[in-house]
Image: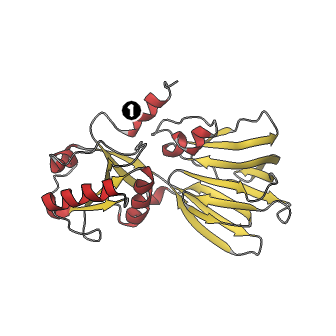
Amino acid sequence: MPDYSAKQVSFVSSGTAEADAAMAKLRLRYGDTGLHSAEVVVALGGDGLMLQTLHKVMDRRIPVFGMNCGSVGFLMNDYTDDRLLERLAAAKPTRIAPLAMHVTDVTGAEYDALALNEVSLFRTTYQAVKVEIDVDGRRQMDELICDGVLLSTPAGSTAYNLSAHGPILPINSPLLALTPISPFRPRRWRGAILGNSAVVTFRARETEKRPVSAVADNVEFKNVAVVVVREARDHQVTLLFDPGTGLEERILSEQFRY
């Protein structure tokens, strides 16, 4: 990684009292060049802020170094205001390719969004949804009856995917996790592991009776009919981690937690 000067760094906060206080202290010590001029961004908060920041800088390919001022902080480094520039210079990059979601709703309107963690389909009423699933243009499941279904990147495999009992994927693996959420039929289906070149198409059935929403990270579209998801390698983002604490090590450790 390059050596950064204080004039190249910008700070963002999740808005909590703890994160705002940390940002004020860091700005006093290192200054702040502003987000639009920065060559590296330091995000102060939790994983939600990290995802928001990565989306903001995605088109500019600026690396983001997170420091945990939140709760879980799986994507964050430990917080300290000492030796920040030295930490940035020594940090190890992890690159993540997001998923591109293309939605067609029941009126025929079309929308696009990117997801660094996962694309999810959810029921929006008390009734389970019915979803057809195609992979690379071939029907793989005629009808999944469930609360929802998600497609996860390796980076997102330890997030909602893991809570839905999906597999943990090594961060550098060319894989995606397709995981049902509370499946009713087929009851024993646990999902699938797909190559990252797969194009997955979800088609909602009985949409008037069983409305479905589609979510890419935190962007939601309601009353969807068809959702097509593929990896978007041209929109990679870069996270920075202190040596020995990157996502590769964290995801490996997560597989041995009990």
Q: Is residue 188 above or below residue 233?
A: above
Q: Answer whether residue 10 is visible to the viewer in this image.
A: yes
Q: Is residue 23 left or right of residue 139?
A: left
Q: Quadrant of residue 57?
A: bottom left
Q: Is residue 43 visible?
A: no
Q: Amino acid at mark 1?
A: Glu
In the image, residue 48 above or below residue 73: below
* Mark 1 lies on residue: 249
Residue 119's spot in the image, x, y percent?
60, 54
**126 lies left or right of 50:** right
Give the number of marks: 1
- Of 139 and 91, nearer the camera is 91
Identify which residue is drawn at 73% across, 54% down.
137
Specify how the rendered protein is coloured. Answer: secondary structure
Q: Report the residue at 20% width, 45% height from top.
A: 87
Q: Nearer the viewer, residue 37 or 129?
A: 129
- Quarter-wise, where is residue 52 in the image? bottom left
The picture places residue 16, in percent across and down from the top left corner, at 37, 57
Name the residue: 62% across, 48% down: 151
The percent coordinates of residue 127 (x first, y second) are 82, 54
Residue beneath the point at 69% across and 61% down: 213
Q: Secondary structure at mark 1?
A: helix
Residue 120 horizontal side relative to residue 74, left or right: right
Residue 182 location (% of width, % of height)? 73, 42
**Does 132 sit left or right of 222 as displayed?**
right
